[in-house]
């Protein structure tokens, strides 16, 4: 007989009935319950990590980087020698050329921007020198540019010279050389001077204009 079978047999013979043994039943597996357990474990782990992190001191990442080496006085002096304070130029020709190119481009941009602002803010829409509308190039379509360039140019003034410099338009004019008005060739008038105004004696040099020796001897004789 197996172990304990003889004792069970004696109890049954005596009329004593033993209660059934108590055995814990295995819990039923449920997918929703398993997910809930995992969520609870994850939240608990997150809370624990947050609690541990709250007790720490955060260090800036820049403090962990290697220190940047600064320039020495010798290096600074060497860089300063690259620019000549007398001629106001860089000693390196290529660097000076790049700097001049950059300055030229920035100068043109600044002047163009200032010109646009001037045209927009001024009340006069025409140029006081050539009396042309300064906003026409912005309003005219691009297709008429070539037609207008080939059209003959008409004079905008009654004179054929620049009133500021007194130079003919052939040499001093705002338009291109092929669009400038041609000055009319005029012969000078002959000037008539009264005979009484013609003096044969120069009061500055105290000499006669012609035959000074003969006329001076004549004056001595008289």
Image: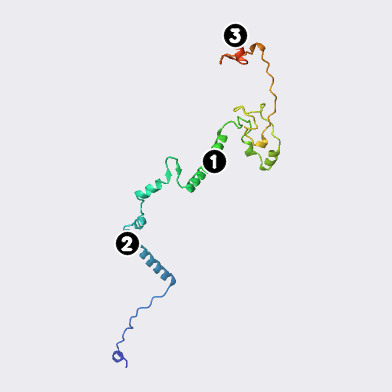
Near-viewer residue (127 or 13): 127
Q: Horizontal and vertical percent for residue 155? A: 68, 30
Query: Mark 3: few, some, or many residues within 10 Å (few <14, many ≥20)?
Result: few
Q: Residue at x 61, y 12 (%)?
A: 215
Which quadrant, please, contains the C terminus? top right
Give the distance between the C-alpha atoms of the residues marked 2 and 1, in whole angstroms.
Answer: 62 Å
Q: Horizontal and vertical percent for residue 6? A: 29, 92
Q: Earlier in the sequence, mark 2 or mark 3?
A: 2
Near-viewer residue (51 or 212): 212
Asked if residue 118 lies left or right of residue 42, the reply is right
Do the residues under discs 3 and 1 have CB atoms within 8 angstroms? no
Q: Earlier in the sequence, mark 2 or mark 1?
A: 2
Judged from this view, the residue extending furthest toward the top is: 222
> SS at mark 2?
helix
Q: Residue at x 34, y 58 (%)?
A: 64
Do the residues under discs 2 and 1 have CB atoms within 8 angstroms? no
Q: Is residue 91 above or below residue 131?
A: below
Q: Is residue 16 above or below residue 189?
A: below
> According to the image, label 1 marks what residue?
108
Q: Earlier in the sequence, mark 3 or mark 1?
A: 1
Task: For marks 3 and 1, give the one nearer the viewer.
Answer: 3
Q: Is residue 25 above or below residue 82?
A: below
In terms of image quadrants, where is residue 59?
bottom left
Judged from this view, the residue extending furthest toward the bottom is: 1
Task: For marks 2 and 3, give the one nearer the viewer.
Answer: 3
Give the distance between the C-alpha atoms of the residues marked 3 and 1, in whole angstroms.
Answer: 74 Å
> According to the image, label 3 marks what residue?
219
> According to the image, label 2 marks what residue?
52
């Amino acid at each position: 007989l197996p172990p304990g079978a003889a004792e069970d047999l004696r109890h049954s013979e005596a009329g004593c009935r033993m209660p059934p043994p108590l055995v814990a039943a295995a819990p039923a597996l449920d997918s929703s319950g398993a997910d809930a357990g995992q969520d609870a474990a994850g939240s608990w782990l997150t809370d624990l990590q947050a609690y541990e992190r709250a007790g720490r001191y955060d260090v800036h990442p820049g403090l962990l980087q290697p220190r940047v080496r600064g320039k020495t006085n010798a290096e600074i002096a060497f860089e300063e020698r690259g620019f000549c304070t007398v001629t106001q130029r860089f000693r390196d020709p290529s660097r000076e050329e790049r700097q001049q190119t950059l300055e030229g481009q920035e100068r043109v941009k600044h002047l163009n921007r200032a010109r646009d602002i001037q045209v927009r803010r001024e009340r006069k829409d025409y140029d006081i020198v050539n009396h042309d509308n300064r906003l026409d190039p912005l309003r005219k379509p691009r297709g008429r540019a070539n037609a207008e360039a080939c059209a003959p140019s008409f004079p905008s003034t009654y004179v054929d010279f620049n009133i500021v410099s007194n130079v003919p338009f052939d040499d001093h004019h705002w338009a291109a050389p092929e669009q400038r008005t041609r000055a009319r060739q005029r012969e000078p008038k002959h000037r008539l001077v009264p005979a009484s105004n013609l003096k044969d004696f120069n009061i500055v040099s105290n000499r006669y204009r012609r035959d000074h020796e003969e006329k001076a001897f004549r004056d001595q004789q008289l």
